[in-house]
Image (tube, rainbow, N blue to C red):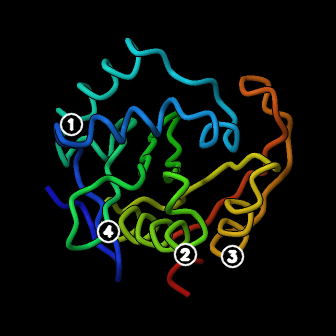
Amino acid sequence: MKIFETDRLEVRRLKQSDELYFTELLTSAVILEKIPVKPATAEIVKDRFETFQKMELSDLGSTKCFCAIVEKGKDEAIGLALFLIENNEQELGYRFRPDYWRKGYGTEVAKGMLDYYFNVLRVSKVIANANVENPGSIRILSKLMNFEKEFFNVELNCTDRSYSITKTEWSD
């Protein structure tokens, strides 16, 4: 089920054929060092895949949800879009398989997610955090959102930059 589309991409619910790519996106050291998080265990990957595959469109506004990012006209998952609703805050996140880095897809999907948050889910503010060692995401978030602060993320043991944007700022 399609959630939204951009010029070149489609974001949709996960389906069974995405499992291999989902596993790569949660376990590849090359991908995860940019976040940085440790690779998920096989048990965690299986549990998360089953949970997120069952999620409905209505769940996007109330919980954490990974969705597949695919190129239009193709079916192979090239990345994951993360919708995170936690502590009364709406956060966006994304990750791509390395073959799809530096193609402008991060900016494109982040714009699509902001449009979806503001125009479909009708939230008033969206936040995003990125590791300072991830220059690609820092560039994307700096273009689309407002820098808030730099802080040490104890949970991930790295320095993050926090960004935010309101619906009013996005509309202007």
Dividing the picture into quadrants, the one containing residue 120 is: bottom left
User: Which residue is labeled 2 in the image?
Assistant: 104
Circle 1 SS class = loop
Q: Residues within 10 Å of mark 1 (few under 14, many from 20)?
A: some
For the N terminus, the quadrant is: bottom left
Residue at 41% over, 70% down = 112
| Position of residue 22 measured from the top left corner of the image (x, y, whole percent) | 36, 38
User: Which residue is labeled 4 in the image?
Assistant: 71
Dividing the picture into quadrants, the one containing residue 172 is: bottom right
The answer to whether residue 160 of the structure is visible from this angle is yes
Q: CA distance from mark 4 to mark 1?
A: 21 Å
Circle 2 SS class = loop
User: Which residue is labeled 1 in the image?
Assistant: 55
User: Which residue is labeled 3 in the image?
Assistant: 143
Circle 4 SS class = strand
Residue at the far top in the pictured view: 43
Q: Residues within 10 Å of mark 4 (few under 14, many from 20)?
A: some
Residue at 67% over, 48% down = 129
